[in-house]
Image: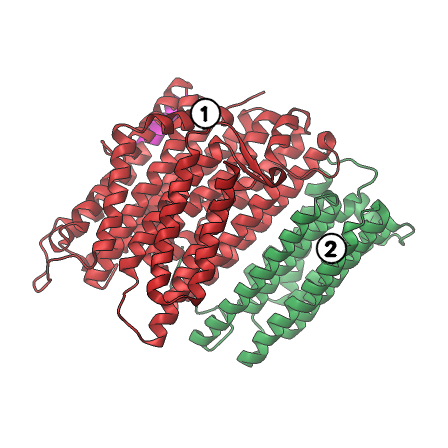
Chain colours: A green, B red
Amino acid sequence: MHVFATLVAAPSTVTDGAETVAVLVLLSQYAMFRAGLSRSQVRLYAFQSLSVSALALIVAATRHIGELYVLAGLSLLLKVILVPSVIMRVLKEVRGDLAGSHRFGVATMVLCAIVLSVFGVFVVEGMPIHSKSLPLPALALAAAVVLVAFLLVIVRSDVVSQAVGFFSLENGVSVASLVLAAGLPFIAEVAFLFDLLVAVVVFGLLMRVHHGRAATLSTRHLERLRG
Amino acid sequence: MAGVLVALLVLPLAASLSSWWARPALTRALTLVSGVATFALALALVPSTGVTAAFGGWLRADSLSIVFLLAVAFLYAATAVFSLGYVRQGEETPEARRYTRRFFAGLNLFAWAMVAAPLMGSLALLWVAIEVTTVVSALLVAIDDTDGAVEAAWKYVLIASMGLGIALLATLVMYYAGTSALGSSNELFYAKLLGAAHGFSPEVVRLSFGLAVLGFGTKMGLVPVHTWLPDAHSEAPTPVSALLSGALLTVSFYAILRFYEVSVRAVGPAFPRDVLLVFGLASLGLAALYLADQRDLKRLLAYSSVEHMGILAIGMSFSAPVAVVGVLLHVLAHAAGKSTAFFGAGSVVRKFGTKELHRVRGVVSALPWSGPMLLLAVLALSAMPPFGLFRSEFLIVEGGLSSQATALSAVLVVLVTVAFLGLSWHASEAMLTPMPEGTVRGETSAWMVGAMVVGMIALVVLGVHPPSQLSELITHAAGELGGAR
């Protein structure tokens, strides 16, 4: 299990640095389960996004891709500053800071998250992706982040946690993108980020509309429609 | 022809931007002009069976994309006509003016994103266009600001966005698969991917295709990731429901077909077909059962959409080319049939003030034009002749039989029959019963009737005698899809 060996080894090279940053992304995902207040979750998301921007810088340096420096800057601007600001503003406007929207206990959820992470890591380890230049453990950790983000959306019953869950899923995909597709044309990368920006605006609008009608950020009463 | 591609992208976007500032009457006129002109431009592309490209290949139209563009553009035009009657005129309150502005701006923007998707030459930008359709349509679902609409919009945007997160992973994995043959800075252009697909790692392509079906399948409404669909379709304003069902679902199917094309060339046809078969059977089977248990007219039509998406997926799992021709014809016929049915449902809601089936009676008597056309549209959706869906489903079953998939073809026919029973049972109860006392016979809007007439004409033309150029286009597109190694 190369991934677990990486988790305990000290970062001796830049590649190890990339893997360490990916571990930070996953750990911040776990911390979101523990965070009771919506504001804490948003701050954790900002930290996670900062880690992703750092990863972009590391990949830019190791693989000599100049465009990734710009992308890291844009990612920092959008995901570390703009997105958290939009959500914080919504929270301020609705004067809400929901606590305790867990459907299960924190310990149960973190255990489930660990099981999912291990599953994600095993799946990626089994994949036929072999490259000396690619930090494969970082990809395994990205898969774990994506799976744990799904769990976060499922087990938290408030609109802020669910939105943050989706945005953190996007962070997991960003890590995978940096590992698998660092050379993807700049236009496509910028389009992805622009798309995230639009999604954030729409999520923010819908959060506000939801609060306007229900006077709460909780989604527990959203059970009239059952698919 | 490259100018046509650019015009297709500019028109709906310009109509959307103008709608924010123009007076309500002008907004309506601009939407109508934009819808009809977009459809005319799409028709202009039909005779060209080659590839039209612009902006270095980022903008591209081949036979397959033109088929889907036709479906979207037709729906855009028909919905623009219907909306003129649906969004009431004459109410000059500030709220009504704001609603009209938002509705038409959103409608045009939604149509723009759906027109853009089949015109993207790269898998990366295709994903971006489909994500834009999600965020814009989520706002349109919520626009009526009812409890149900807000709940449906939240669930829709969350589930669809998570699904598209998976689809983005699929795109990145496909990029990685392509690096072995195309280098580490390929643009994910279809043309390049198709040309080099033989050299891709089969395992990586399989992973990418599986993720693509799961991710884009969420937006297409494939079971078990369909749960947003009935809620969003039933709670959205009717023109939006028509666009969601007839255009958005098929645009997501188009994205899956682009991955399918590459996968067939990289790993052979067996794996992609098996994956589509599993999702298709689950969708058709569940929808056929759920159709019998619906109490809401729009949810009934929504589950019919799940059924038809299942038929599309099953059709692609048959190896015979005639089945693929049937699938592509089904995309067009379903767009015409489902939009007509939703337009009819919109007239029913306006007339009776409810979409609950047990409270709707005597539709055929109460709505002298819309009522019979709604009944005919429901029969068309049940694959009755002489409508386009009969022809397309016939071709799909014929394809199944000629690919030696006799048992599967039989299952398909049985499930479609079960769906027909559920659909026709509820429809006949609401439509052929006597009209309640006190109900005034008459239509609510000539525009709404006009949109249904257009849909019925399209259904009959596609069923009785599709234009030869359209048949050639579909055959050519089916040939593009059928390439195996």
Q: Amino acid at mark 1?
A: His
Judge left or right: residue B343 versus residue B72: left
Q: Nearer the viewer, residue B160 or B36?
A: B36
Q: Amino acid at mark 2?
A: Leu
Judge left or right: residue B363 versus residue A44: left
> Could you tell me residue B250's position as x and y percent?
43, 42
- Chain containing the residue with disc 1: B
Determine the secondary structure under disc 2: helix
Q: Residue furthest bottom?
A: A95
> Could you tell me residue B174's position as x and y percent?
65, 37
Q: Residue at x 55, y 30 (%)?
A: B261
| Magenta-drawn stretch contains B332 | no
Which residue is under mark 1? B476
Task: Please report the bounds of the magenta region as a residue range.
Answer: B405-413
Name the disc covering residue A71, or none. 2
Crowd around label 2: few <14 · some 14–19 · many ≥20 (10 Å): some
Q: Nearer the viewer, residue A148 or B156?
A: B156
Q: Residue furthest right?
A: A12
Q: What whole-number distance in Å separates the C-alpha atoms at marks 1 and 2?
A: 40 Å
Residue B288 seen from this side: no
Crowd around label 1: few <14 · some 14–19 · many ≥20 (10 Å): some
